[in-house]
Amino acid sequence: MNSLISVIVTTYNWPDALSACLLALMAQQDRRFEIIIADDGSGTATQELIKGFIETSEIPLRHVWHEDKGFRAGTIRNKAVAASRGDYLLFMDGDCVALPDFISHHRQLAETGYFVPGNRLLLNEAYTSLVLGQKIPLHKQSLGFFLWQRLQGRINRLLPLLYLPLHSWRYRQPQNWQKAMTCNLAVWKDDFLATNGFDEVFEGWGYEDSDLVIRLIHQGVKRKEGRFAVPVLHLWHRHNDRSQHDENYRRLLQRVADISITRAERGVDQYLETTSA
């Protein structure tokens, strides 16, 4: 797959984490990608940081921002996709750090008719503070370095860092939607548009990414496992407001049960005409 990859990085008012995320993307071995920052209403500190990266980056980088009206990650991701130029979308969060082969391995995994969820390692609170405070470049570290952090209890596991070649087991659960999250998820843009992207009827935190994956599966797009190929290092942060959890989960279960639902009620199509005008 030689197409341009559009990396959609979601962020909200955490410039130190976003800086670590972007520095890791700037260090990728595979350079054929663009970055669209999906900014859910950050203030001036984040905007200034992004401006600096835009001015110095060798990788094409765009900043898509909307006003802060609470958690609207699905909405800003839709807007970012509408502004993207690539044929293949790679969603990640601005508090995640990728290793240098992240883009190249995602490119190897890309296959028509499939979406690819990756996995993550979690840093604990104290180590996250240390990494950001001392600007430790996690993306430059060796497996031995991460083994030491694991032995000290600073990261929750080590296995995702092991690379396994592309084998048939990656196709074993084609309709499994669990644990496919937009902190590390790749999908063809045509498939994303066919499902009308993220459904903005999911308000507040919770399950807008699972809903997208379920509708992709209903559309006939299958899961191809990205474990042991494309991990990210996820910085610790407090949980978002989960007051909408129960309502969103109820809606999600309805979507799981009704295979006729493939398109978002309120999705990306409302931004496509604006972008092309």
Image (cartoon, rainbow, N blue to C red):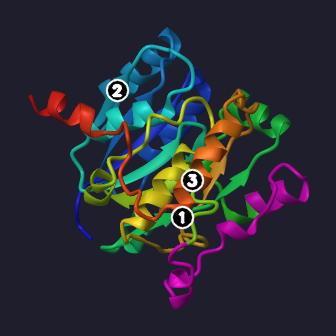
Residue 170 among magenta residues: yes
Secondary structure state at the residue bearing disc 3: helix
Q: Amino acid at mark 2?
A: Val
Q: Identify the residue under disc 3.
A: 254
Q: Residue furthest left?
A: 277
In the image, is 70 to the left or to the right of 246? Answer: left
Residue 83 shows in the view: no
116 relative to 156 in the view: left or right: left
Q: Are marks 2 and 3 in contact (CB under 8 Å)?
A: no
Q: Quadrant of the N terminus?
A: bottom left
Report helix, strand or loop for mark 1: loop
Let me know if residue 270 is in the magenta part.
no
Q: Residues within 10 Å of mark 1 (few under 14, many from 20)?
A: many
Q: Position of residue 60 (x, y in %)?
A: 27, 39
Indicate which label's residue lies in the foreground, 2 or 3.
Answer: 3
Q: Nearer the viewer, residue 106 or 143?
A: 106
Segment tinted magenta in the rendering: 146-175
- Three-letter code for the amino acid on which mark 3 is drawn: Gln
